[in-house]
Amino acid sequence: MTNKYDMKLKLFYLLIALVGGFTFVSCDDDDDAPKLKDIPQACLDSFKAKFPEAKNVDWERKGTYYVAEYDKFNNREVEVSAWFAPDGTWNMTDTDYGKDLFMLPTEINTAFNQSEYSSWTIDDIDLYEYPDTTKDFYLIEVEKAGQTDMELYFKTDGTLIKAIPDTNTDITPDTQI
């Protein structure tokens, strides 16, 4: 005959087993990521030619694009995502600088510090580069307590293109700025 204590202990162990089981079932092992053999050779060749220094590359498929992600060291580590069409055409690179304004060119640093958002907290900084370099821009996401988060778009010469409420939308090669 079991007492109440033994029954509670068995229920407790059962609960732990169930929670543990659900945890392992819900883990994502990134099965959606394409295998290297599934990446078009044209993308692999184009990537290697454009980014020969890249190490530890992970590939993803985003819409019609193949995206190579890797870390780059420029005094500090930054994350880079290079976007390619299936035919191997490079369409865009997104370099994520985190929150470090000091990694940016003087023009961008100065423009931000002279903007009305200079006292806001930087949440993220990205550089988007395109085959047509006139389309390149920096995106600085800022936040301030009690205010709507903002996205600040700067040309590479420091000109503010626009400041809009944060859309939390990913930028792809097809995004119009």
Image (spheres, helix red, strand yellow):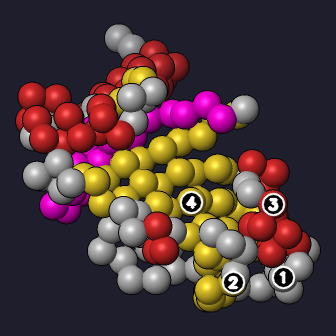
Above or below for 87 versus 123:
above
For badge 2, the amino acid type reads Leu
Q: Give the number of marks.
A: 4
Question: Is tag 3's residue or tag 1's residue first in the polypeptide sequence?
Answer: 3
Callout 2–callout 4 Cβ contact below 8 Å = no
Magenta residue span: 58-74
Question: Is tag 2's residue or tag 3's residue first in the polypeptide sequence?
Answer: 3
Check residue 119 for magenta coloring.
no
Residue 142 disc label? none
For badge 3, the amino acid type reads Thr
Callout 1–callout 2 Cβ contact below 8 Å = yes
Q: Circle 3 sits in a helix, a strand or a loop, which is it?
A: helix
Mark 4, residue position: 127
As measured in the structure, the alpha-carbon distance from the residue carrying label 2 to the one carrying label 4 is 14 Å
What residue sits 66% from the left and 60% below the top?
Answer: 124
Question: Is tag 2's residue or tag 4's residue first in the polypeptide sequence?
Answer: 4
As measured in the structure, the alpha-carbon distance from the residue carrying label 1 to the one carrying label 4 is 18 Å
Question: Is tag 1's residue or tag 4's residue first in the polypeptide sequence?
Answer: 1
Q: Residues within 10 Å of mark 1 (few under 14, many from 20)?
A: few
Residue 160 disc label? 2
Most extreme residue toward the top, as rendered? 1
Question: Is tag 3's residue or tag 4's residue first in the polypeptide sequence?
Answer: 3
Q: Circle 2 sits in a helix, a strand or a loop, which is it?
A: strand
For badge 1, the amino acid type reads Ser
- Main SS class of the magenta portion in the image: strand
As measured in the structure, the alpha-carbon distance from the residue carrying label 2 to the one carrying label 3 is 14 Å
What residue sits 41% from the left and 48% below the top?
Answer: 81
Check residue 66 for magenta coloring.
yes
Above or below for 79 versus 129:
above
Give the x, y percent position of residue 147: 77, 85
Mark 1, residue position: 115
